[in-house]
Structures are given as C-alpha cells and as structure tokens.
Image: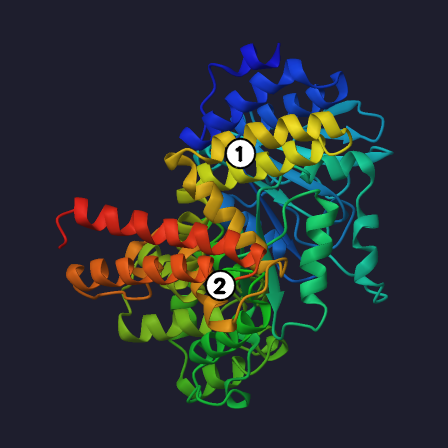
Amino acid sequence: MLVTALQGQQLAGPLCAAVANLCAALQPQVSPQTAAGFQEVLRRLHAPLQVAVAGRIKSGKSTLVNALIGRRVAPTDIGECTRLVTRYQYGTVDRIEVVLRDGRRQVLPFDANGMIPASLGVEGVSHIEAYLTNAVLRDITVIDTPGLGSLDAASVARTEELLDPVSRNAVAGAEAVLYVVTQGVRADDHSTLAAFSAATASREAGPVNAIAALNKVDAVAPETVEGSEGDVWRAAQILAAKQAELLKPRVADVLPVISLLAESAETGEFTSADAEALRALAALDADTRTMMLMSGDLFTSWECDVAAGVRSRLLEKLDLYGIGRALEALDAEPALPAGALRRVLFDASGFAEVRGRLDAVFRARADGIKAAAALASVTSLAAGDAGERQRVHDAIELLLARPEAHQLRLLEALTLVSSGAVTLAPDLTEEVLRVGSTPDVAAQLGMPGRPGAELVAFALERAGWWRSFASFGATPAQARVAHVVHRAYFLIWQQLRAGGHR
C-alpha cells in the first residue's frame, strides 16, 4: 500500500497530516478508481511543495528557474527542451529522466556544462524530470513550463493544447505559481493564468498561491514612466505596482527582477575572470565607457584592451545594465573583490525580494497551500458519484470544523472571493484578501508598525463587524465568507492577547 510506503516521509505540517488521514479513512468507502485518485493525492501530500514557473515565450522563465535553483541547468534558448515541461526535484544522484508519451523512461546525463542537453535525441518525449543533489529542492519542486502563447499569436484559449495528457500529469500537482511577465501586462494575462490553472488541473491561481515577477526591467526606459526621476529601478517599481493592480486578485504581488543578473550571481556564472575584465573596463576614460554602454554592438566592437570575446561573454552574463552597475561599484571602490562585486550584481537584480516573497507566500504556508490543494482534488475526484460525493463532503466538513483547521476555511474563502465566485463590495474584498494573503498579524490587520493594544482593539472590532454582516444584510454566499473572516479576526484577537497585548 502506498499509505504504508509514505508513512516515513515528511509531511508539510498538521493540516497535511489531517488531510492525509482523511484520504486514508475514505479509501475503503469509495470506488477503486476514486481510491486510486486518493493514492495520488497522498503521494503529493508527502512530496515537497510544487511551484510551477509560467509565462510567455521569451519572458525569461528558465533563467529565473536557474536562479531559484542556484545552478545553471535549465536551457534558456528556444529549442526542443523549452517546449517541454521540466520538473526539477531533489535526488541523491544528479540525473535526467526523459519520460516518453507511452510512460517509458530513458536516463540521460547532463551535458559537459552541467545543463540539460539542447537536443535529447529521443522521439515521443512527454516531459523531463531532472534530479539534483541540491538543498534548495529538498522542500520545493520547481516545474518549468512551456512558454504560453506562441510566436504566431495563437489564442490563449488553446494553452491547454501545449500539454499532452502525460505531460499535463507532470504539472498537475503544481500547488503554487510564479507567473513571469515582461514590460506591460497584456489584456489576456488573466485568461492566461486561468488557462494555466486549467491545464495543470490545479486550483485557481490567486493571492494564496500565486505571485508574479516583472522580468527584464533593465529594458525599461525610465523617461517614459512618470515619477521615475530617470531611475531605471524606480521606474520598474512603479510599473510593477501598476501591474499588481491589473492582475489582482490573481496574484499576491508583482515584483520587479532582472533574472539574467540573478542567474549569473546565484549560479557561479560570474567568475573572478569576469571581475578582472570589468576592472579593466573601469580603467577606461569616462567618454569611451559612455559610448560603449550605448548599445550591445558598440560595447563588443569598440577598440579597447579588453578582448571582444571577453566583452561578448560579459554582455551575455550581465547585459549593459549589469555591466554599468558593476562599473559604478568599481568607480566607488576600485579594489572591490570578485565576491563583493557578485553581491553588487545580485542586489541589482532584485532577486532577493522575489525569493523572500516566495518564502513568505509559499514556503512558510506550504502546509495550508498543499492541504487546500489536496482537499480540492479529493472533492473533484468524488464528484461523479452522489454517494461518494456526500461521504467526502461530510468528512471534509468534520475536518474543517476543527479550530486548528480554520486556515483551510480562510484559504477557501479567499479563493471564493478572488475567483469572483462570491462578490463583495470592493473595500470588503480588499479586506478579505489582506486577511487571508499573509501570515503576518499586523499586515493582516492592515496596521503594520502599530502598537499591540491598537491591534487587539481593531481585531475585536472587525470580528464584531463581520459577525453582524453575516447575520444582517449578507447573501447566503457572502455570509459563508463573513463567518470565516469573523472567526479569523477572533483568532487573531486571541493570539494577540495570549502574547501579552491588552
């Protein structure tokens, strides 16, 4: 039995354990087909959190995947592998398993550079599973997906056709989404996120399980962004804030990033030889440097003591923006060592904030995210038979009635509101999203930095308001959400009082 085989494996937390027990208890009460589906749910509950990286073609998804993993392993040029789903997961031996459409597997080595080969040399490939002895992957599996949309502007409604049934199974367990955009959010990005959710058989993308990265922000022309004061990064932050408004409530946040710089800094691609080449460029006169940094062609073709091939490699690793930032750092401190220069480039990439948000939104809440996704799968699996559906419904209601399972109720309410299944006034919608989208109490209350006594009083006040709203004036659907939010505020109030805030 899979249940027995998985007993020694680590679950994300008590909520996942409760859902696993529910699945095990229900298996004898459902059909063999449904029971087999429950076995798969159990397997996913015992697996690391699965985060799918999605986005359009040439948005820099694979470069961002390399930065997340801390190793340059994902191919970044458009080719055979970038049209396939690739799952990066922890393994005791580095290896590539090519999964064929008929279910057979072939093991391949990484290429001489430690990357997935540009050409697999195998027919009928469904997807790739890469196993890496990488500590990052112990508690998270990263799924690199094919670029959404196509070069011939095919309809986003056909996104699901990118994945055959076997490769769709490879991403079906994705419990969270990192969505990558560049420059402006297009009108159909909401549809693209929805189509991705459908293609992965996952829950709706929302503020609980999705964030977006505004990539390649070094290409932003700051003079075109009001309020940027000519600064590229400030312009990027303004654009990211605007795009966050456009993509709400599909994503928790939109964060600016330069994935190329992040990849070079995080994967060891930036070397001491690169630092020395930059030091030689920093020694050039200001006018020459200004001219060289005007375009990639000028940078690589200008006559200077640094070989053109060396400059081409710098351009590939850092682009003009990264080179410029490195030269500024060397102007301020000419003896800056390679390690410190790498840190400058990492800081300039904005990747630290992306990783921090991934930790806050995904890793820290993995127990709730995985448990909620599992319950959604269990409900879907039992939908075909009325008797099974009722038994599963009753079991889930008993589980959700426990005080310790309230987080699941809150995630459910958040999903209902963010997907539009339950409509509230805009200010109430914003409040529900705020309460359910962060584990930080002060942020949940919308009162960061305020004294504890104020937090206590506000939590109790809002608990009372939502209870009244549930009883008077709310529709039945709204009342269901309101009761959950009331309970969330009440639990916050109890938590603050237990912590000594009065």
Q: Residue 268, relative to residue 334: is it above or below?
A: above
The disc label shown at residue 93, or none: none
Q: Quadrant of residue 231?
A: bottom left
The residue depicted at 31 percent of the width and 50 percent of the height is: 490
The residue depicted at 84 percent of the width and 63 percent of the height is: 155
Q: Nearer the viewer, residue 37 or 346?
A: 37
Look at the image and tell me whether residue 305 can be seen. Answer: no
Disc 1 is placed on an element classified as helix
The residue depicted at 33 percent of the width and 71 percent of the height is: 329
Mark before the other along the chain sequence, 1 or 2? 2
Q: Residue 348, relative to residue 363: is it above or below?
A: below
Between the residue at mark 1 and the residue at mark 2, the CA separation in whole angstroms equals 31 Å
Rendering coords of residue 423 (x, y %): 59, 64
Q: How is the image coloured?
A: rainbow
Rendering coords of residue 470 (x, y %): 46, 58
Q: Quadrant of residue 172?
A: top right
Q: Nearer the viewer, residue 155 or 109?
A: 155
Look at the image and tell me whether residue 273 can be seen. Answer: yes
The residue depicted at 56 percent of the width and 68 percent of the height is: 216
Q: Quadrant of the C terminus?
A: bottom left
Q: Type of residue at label 1?
A: Glu
Rendering coords of residue 80 (x, y %): 78, 46
Disc 2 is placed on an element classified as loop
Rendering coords of residue 41 (x, y %): 62, 28
Q: Nearer the viewer, residue 169 or 112?
A: 169
**Residue that badge 2 annotates:** 253
The disc label shown at residue 397, or none: 1
